[in-house]
Structure formats: structure tokens, C-alpha cells
Image (spheres, rainbow, N blue to C red):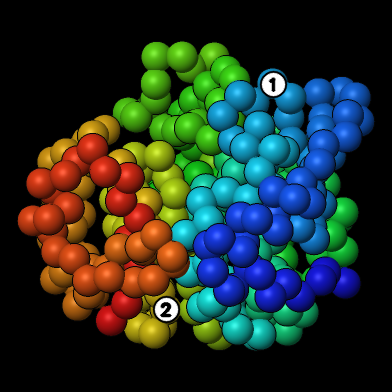
Amino acid sequence: MILPLPSHVVSNRAELEEVSRRRANGVDYGDHRLLCRLLGDFLACVDTRDLMLGPRLVLDGFWEAWMTLAIARYLQPGMWCVDVGANYGYYTLLMVAGCGPEGRVVACVPNSVLAGTYLPQKLALNGCHRGVEICPKVIGNLYDRTVHFFLHKGDLATSSLERWAYNHRSQTIQVPSITLDRLCADWPGLDLVKIDAEGAEALVWVGMPKALRRFPQAAVVLELHLQRDPPQTTNLLHQIERAGYALQTVGYEGDLMSTDAATILAQPQEHWRLWLVR
């Protein structure tokens, strides 16, 4: 059974970072794998060929401390969560620990290396045998379709759909797609959706209106990629506001601060993480 969230993960940024770095360690397991310790307590394997997220997890033991704090503080036993763009499953693990065995978490990642190897290994290493599943599909606006998905050499975190693929793409794969409405169609509840879709966040939003109407209390944590598609981002922000969601950004200490579309669009260079609630 997975360990519950340790106290330093919900305390403050200085303590979270200090404890995680002090306990961080990496052990070579061969076959391009490094075993490391996350957030001081949890285990994970990362790929040595990944030069973006992997080194930070191994050396620091955490990722995006402010977002880690915000999500960890929000989670409660029994919650139902979706991690769109789960990657290695860092936030998936956080959700499973916070929601406990009575909750449910679905980790969505179309990269077959992550979905078939690293994410299952992480869940097994931490005793996650109940209440969590892996969805190896693109989450977007299409259901029961096959789409092109692009992988990037040395950077597992920025794999994306064709429209937003970087020039250093290294491989094209065909993956099935599904909407969040379809994914959550038979769920009795939904409490948190984390979306990190590398430019395709508007497509994810288009595919989840029924779920948001059924579960108006659900919080949506959304990473915006403003510079990839400014017109799409502008339209998305207006859709969010018309749906009755307050725009909030996550501050340095994991605190939530009110903002508005004009402020966000005026600073496209910023790495915006929005916390949306009705």
C-alpha cells in the first residue's frame, strides 16, 4: 500500500525542497534506467536518455514545488482525479497518495515508453495496486480516432500532437484518442483534472463539457502554452470565463491568486499554471 503524503509536501516550499534534495539519490539499474527517490519518500525510475525532466527528478527529488504544494494541499481521501499528460507519473503518484485506496486516479500518457514501462514501474515500486489505472491515449476533442503523436529525442516531457511538435522530433507514432467526457462517462464523481497537454489544452477543454457540467465542483489545473498558439489560447481563456470559472494562478508558495485574461495574455513569456474553480 502506498505511503500517505508526508507532512513536508503540504507545509511550505522551503521545507519541501530541502527535505526532497537531502534525501534525493540515484542508482543505476541498467537498460537506461535510474532509480531515484521523489519527495523524500517515494521511488521512481527515470530514463537516462531524458535530458529534461529526468535529471531534475534524480538530483532534486521534486518537480515544480509550487504546483506540488497546491495539489497536495487540495487532495483528500476518496477523491477522483485525472492526470492528463502524466509523463513519468509524478503528479499521478501525488494524487494516489493523497486520495488513498478509496479514491481513484487515471494517468493519461500516449507515449508508449512511459505508459508501458516507467509509469507502471513507479506505481509498482510504491505499492499502488488499487484505485489507479493508466490510459495510453491522447486526451483531446476526438473519440475513437487514431492520431499522429510526436516524440522528442532527449525530452520526454514535450511530446505532443503534430501541430505543436518541436523541430527536434525524433519519432512519429499512431495512438488512439479519447475525450474526457467519454473517459469519465460512468464515474460517480470527479474532483481534480490536471492538464499538461503541450499546446493541446484547448482540445482537451473542448472534449470535457459534459464532465464539467456533471461535476461543477471539480478543480481544473491547467498549464498554458501561450507562445505555441496565441489565437487558440485567447479563445480558450474566453471559453473558460464564459463557463463560469474564476481564473487563478498558482503562486511561489503554492497559494492561489486571482488573475484575468488580459494579464495572462500581456505576459506570454510567463509559465502560466491556472487553477480553475467555479
Q: Residue at x 82, y 37 (%)?
A: 26
Badge count: 2
Name the residue carrying label 1.
Answer: 49
Mark 1 → mark 2, Cα distance in angstroms: 36 Å
In the foreground, 221 or 55? 55
Q: Secondary structure at mark 2?
A: loop
- Circle 1: element type: loop
Against 176, is 179 above or below? below
168 to the left or right of 116: left
Which residue: 87% across, 54% down?
125
Q: Position of residue 82 (x, y in %)?
A: 54, 64
> Which mark is nearer the camera, 1 or 2?
1
Residue 15 quadrant: bottom right
Q: Label 1 crowding class (10 Å Cα cut-off): few <14, some 14-19, many 20+? A: some
Question: Which residue is at a point 59% across and 20% down the rendered structure image?
Answer: 154
Name the residue: 50% across, 31% down.
159
**Disc 2 designates what residue?**
218
Image x and y of residue 88, in percent: 66, 44
Q: Is residue 51 left or right of residue 64?
A: right
Query: Residue 109 bears which disc, if any?
Result: none
The amino acid marked with disc number 1 is Arg
Residue 239 in the image: x percent, y percent? 17, 62
Q: Earlier in the sequence, mark 1 or mark 2?
A: 1
Is residue 183 visible in this depiction of the protein?
no
